[in-house]
Structure formats: structure tokens, C-alpha cells
Amino acid sequence: MKLASSIRSLALLGALLLAGSSLAQSRPAEDPKTRLAKAEAMFQERCKKAGEFIHRTAENVEGILLMKVRPDKINYDDQYRMDDPYGSDVTGKGYFEIFLYGKDAKGSLVEQGARTNGYRHVDAIDAKDGKRYRYTGSVKAVGRKDITAYNVQIELKRDPNYDLNIYAFVLDQSPAPDPASRYGVTFDDISTREERDYWIAGSSLKVIDLKTNEVIAERIGYMMDRGQGNTGGGRAPWLMAEHHACPDFPKDSGGHPFKGYQTRNFVEKVLRIEQIKERN
């Protein structure tokens, strides 16, 4: 009796699944033009609340706490990974370094030859042990030039005291002392499922006064892939979405969107860096 009942239940379930499948197959696919128009309208509506909102600034800030760190890998085409593709700029240890770099005479971030300094330090909590660490950076000798190289030989003939050291910006990590930095920086992916259905990514970047628990500045941004996820020919949807963003990203010399250092640039508008006379 029980066996017959189970068989009837399975048959009924199979019939329901078959009916659902037939219904899904009978639904017409969304017209590409209609889909793009809906995505564009949704995107433009989101852009009405996008922008930079700075409520208060602080002067002579030495360091900051990075309340979140960027993933090690860039999201090129994962439609529903909520990892803030709009705000993603630098991955890995580079996310710490960009806050420590100085600027040259043109105002560009540089590892060496800076006219002004970056923040003295950035703190972050290591997810592995839950401890707070401090990151500092400076230009150090990391190797020696090949004295048999032709150009090195020329320089040695011109100047016997020619420096044979190879220099690079080096990131140092150590346990963070107390007190912690007063100001924190964090980011969130504010996309909804519906927005991601139409390849729209939303981003929030906040600067927080940790002493008063006050959000003193926020940047809200959105971007949309007009190709609606098309990956033909090696196309990367989230990279292409950078061309259709609000606020717009600055352009490089080739006219392409440049997202690098956007977090540092916004944070520095809010937390003005304390300038020191001598750099390491």
C-alpha cells in the first residue's frame, strides 16, 4: 500500500515538473531592445542618488583604519557576486600601498620621487587571527644592479660613486599600537538582485569618525553593462560597465576609464593628510 502511494506521489511530482518546464519553455525570451531600455531606465533612476556627499572634513590626519580590504582578484564577469565591482580599484597589498604613496609635482601617486607624502600608516584587522596590524611603507634598497650591464658600465665611468642599489617601495607590517586610528574607511555593495539581473552594480564608500560613530562622507556610485553580460570575443561585462557609470570615472591618456586610486582620492578629500618635512 505504501509502495503504491509513493509511486503515485512520484508520478504526480513528475507531471508537475514537466508542466512547469513546458510553461517556462513557452514563455518568450525578453526582447534585447526592451531589456536594454528597462536596464537603462533603472540605471538612470539609480544615478539620481549617486555622487559624493562630504559632510565634514578633518585636517592633519596621520593614518586610517581600513575596515574592509579589497578581494585579491578582480570580478570580471560574475553577475551576482556582491563584491562591489564599481568601487574595486586596487587588489592585494596594493590596497594598503595606495594610501601610503606620495604625490609628484603633477599630483599623481608615485612610489618614488614624491613631493608630498601619503598617510603615515594604515591599520587593518587580519581575518586569519582577528588582530589589528599597522602597515607602513618606504623606499628601500632591494637589490644591486648588474655591473656587467652596458648602461651601468657607462654610468660608472661617468661617476665612480654611481649608486648600484635598486630601490623599490616596500610595505612593512607590524602589530598595531593603541590607540586605534580615529577614522575608518569601508565599502559596501548596495546592489539588489533585480539590479544585478540587469547588470547594474551599486557601490557605497564611507569615511567614518570612529570616535563619534558618524559617517562624515560617502560616495555612492553605479555602473551598468550595456551588453547585458555578453562575453563574446573575450568581453568582460564588469570592465565594459566602467564606460557607463555615475559618477563617471576619470579617463586615461587613451580615453579609457581609469578606476585606480579612486578610493584614496576620495578619502583624501575628506581626511587631509598631515604633511611631514622629511620622507624616508
Image (cartoon, helix red, strand yellow):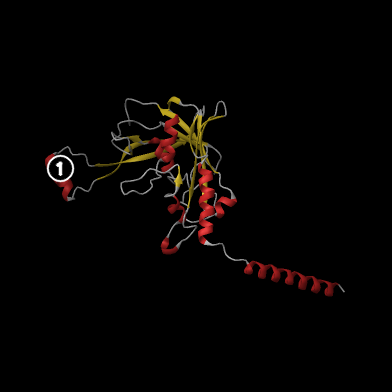
Residue 183 spot, x, y in % from top left: 50, 30
The reply to whether residue 83 is in sight is no
The C terminus - image quarter = top left
Where is mark 1, residue-wise? Answer: 156
The answer to which image quadrant residue 98 occupies is top left
- Give the camera-side residue of 172 and 95: 95
The N terminus - image quarter = bottom right
Q: Residue at x 46, y 61 (%)?
A: 231
- Give the camera-side residue of 169 and 100: 100
Q: Residue furthest left?
A: 157
The reply to whether residue 266 is in sight is yes
Three-letter residue code for mark 1: Leu
- Give the camera-side residue of 51 and 147: 51
Residue 202 spot, x, y in % from top left: 52, 45
Q: Within 10 Å of the Cα at label 1, are there few (<14), some (14-19), or many (20+) other Cα atoms?
A: some
The answer to which image quadrant residue 119 occupies is top left
Residue 268 spot, x, y in % from top left: 42, 32
- Give the camera-side residue of 6 and 144: 6
Residue 66 spot, x, y in % from top left: 49, 37
Q: Residue at x 42, y 40 (%)?
A: 262
28 is higher (above) or lower (below) than 48: below
The answer to which image quadrant residue 136 occupies is top left
- Left or right of 34 in this view: 137: left
Q: Secondary structure at mark 1?
A: helix
Count of numbered labels shown in the rendering: 1
